[in-house]
Image (tube, rainbow, N blue to C red):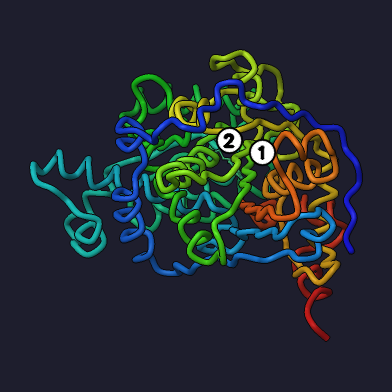
Amino acid sequence: MPSFPQHPFTLLANPRFQPAEPYGAHRSALLSAAALSQASDVITSWSGYAITPLHSLPGLARSAGVASLHYKDEGSRFGLGSFKALGGAYAVARLLCRVLGQRLGRSVSHAQLRTDPALRLACADITVTCATDGNHGRSVAWGANMLGCRCVIYIHATVSEGRKAAIERYGAQVVRTSGNYDDSVQQADRDAKTNGWFVISDTSYPGYMDIPRDVMQGYQLMVHEAVSALPQWPTHVFVQAGVGGFAAAVCAYFWERSTEQRPVFVVVEPQQADCLLQSARAGTVVAVKGDLDTLMAGLACGEVSLLAWDILNTGANAFCAIPDAAAVDTMRLLASAQGGDPVIVAGESAVAGLVAALLTAQDSTARTALEMGPDSRVLLFGSEGDTDPALYQQLVGRSAAQVLQDGAPA
Ligand SMILES: Cc1ncc(COP(=O)(O)O)c(C=O)c1O
């Protein structure tokens, strides 16, 4: 049976969690089942769309003392390696329809965008941009390439050359800035204003809500796929967070659809970039400063997305911060396929939710606080595969191809 080493971690019960608060009209205006249905129509029409696997991990569930662990594996999403393929590209599609609609004085649908040669030509005059630690920028670049607009992506000092090349593959111009992720966000904003470009950000701030909302709406397709494949509604959901858009999209999905039985929802961050946990502790949005030095590149964010905060502030049961070493142990655990579990290739930012679930399971205080027990059905989102193949090999000791080959039945 797989065993999991002890690691120090922080679990903060959310003092503002409101179990009885209705989802409410203002949240429905942000994320809703109706808007998800629109997003689903668009995204499932793209070439290469396929439902990603939902793995059952019975071996890990046994060792964690819970009824089930399910892991939605986003590593194969549109060949881009992460769930982010759903968000940025969808927001690009929505933006192009909006901008061209305004310019032409009529409504422009996504289907027209794909089929009308004149609209495609008009797209070539539009430039989208964003800052990224890799995955979001890859999605925006891919969407821009698919829909025929121009794209400039900003990466910060520590984004690997592998991630840079993966963005350039989709024809985007990539600009490397000094400083951390938040500095690159500011640089992208400044250059967009100067050049008349459109910022497709996955984080929201006052006056900039529509596009990050579209991004989050795209993410909900992943949740819907997972729930459709689950044998039963989960009792616990652990989701990793950078700016919080991903976690909020998942939280909102369950909140909107649950009358009484909302799953216990836990937001998980790296110890070095725990802006949501710190905000929950402070009772208001606070930024984490410094170089946010974590291996979990996709989660290395110091500032919370306001839209995400609006949902997680009262919608999350708890916030958890975990060390990098626990993420690496979990990547190795998933690559080793013990206890009858399938082999899974999971990148550094993919496993934080699973880490928190496993650490909670073996800590009696945390287990009690989150009401985790033998009947618990835990859902996790493996948000990326080996999006940085060289780093994956270095951390796991084998390439993704070797891991899969070693795990294949003889
Ligand atoms: C693989 C992966 N998982 C999770 C996240 C967190 O998403 P968010 O920044 O919306 O919280 C990211 C963000 O880039 C990511 O790349």
Q: Can you tell which quarter of the image residue 158 is in?
A: top right
Q: Residues within 10 Å of mark 1 (few under 14, many from 20)?
A: some
Say if mark 1 contacts mark 2, CB within 8 Å: yes
Say left or right for 154 vs 366.
left
Q: Which residue is mark 2?
A: 155
Asked whether 213 or 247 is in front, the reply is 247
User: In the rendered image of this protein, does residue 54 appear above or below residue 318?
Assistant: below
**Residue extending farthest bottom:** 410
Quarter of the image where the N terminus is located: bottom right
Asked whether 359 or 232 is in front, the reply is 232
Q: Which mark is residue 102?
A: none
Quarter of the image where the C terminus is located: bottom right
Query: How many numbered marks does the figure carry?
Result: 2
Asked whether 182 or 23 is in front, the reply is 23
Name the kind of residue labelled 2 in the image: Ile
In x, y percent, where is residue 25? 30, 33
